[in-house]
Image (tube, helix red, strand yellow):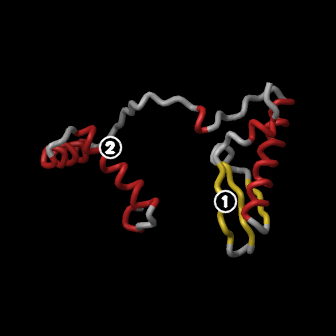
Amino acid sequence: MTTPAKDAKAYSYRIEWNEEENAYVGLVSEFPALKAQAPSLESALAAIQKAVSDLLTELAQKHALPPKPWNQRQYSGRLVLRLPPSLHRRLAQEAEDEGVSLNTWIVTLLAGRRERQTNGDEEGR
């Protein structure tokens, strides 16, 4: 059996600088309501991991199941979308113009959007 502290390390953390608070803020994707402030990156990470560990302990005491960490969730790679027929038509035409399947075209568009966001390109947002 694992401990809450060890389990807490499996979650997805992000540290951001908060200008208003003049502090780093630790966030965790799987528990969006949790935040922890600290004066340094390292202490913000430690603080948010402690908050998650404490929450996992509390959930265990209540026999409640915590959300699975993102990296432990299984995905099939299949996604069914509902979209307006006009968008479906436009995407199908673009895919044909590019000489690829509609699936390949949509994956290319999504991957390109993510790449632009990662590189800080505001137009991709």
- Residue, x 63% and y 47% (percent of image)? 29
Query: Residue flagged by tag 1: what amino acid is it?
Result: Ile
Quick one: SS at disc 1? strand
Discs 2, 1 touching: Cβ within 8 Å: no
Residue 64: image quadrant is top right
User: In terms of depth relative to the viewer, which is nearer, 7 or 102?
Assistant: 7
Q: Is residue 97 left or right of residue 58?
A: left
* Upstream in sequence: badge 2 or badge 1: 1
Residue for badge 1: 15
* 10 versus 20 height, above or below: above
Residue 69, label in figure: none
What residue do we see at 36% from left, 49% from top?
110
Q: Could you tell me residue 49's position as x and y percent?
A: 76, 48
**In the foreground, 42 or 37:** 42
Distance Cα–Cα, label 2 vs label 1: 29 Å
Quarter-wise, where is residue 100 in the image? top left
Image side of residue 1 versus residue 100, left or right: right
Nearer the observer, 61 or 73:
73
Name the residue located 78 percent from the left edge and 68 percent from the top edge. Answer: 39
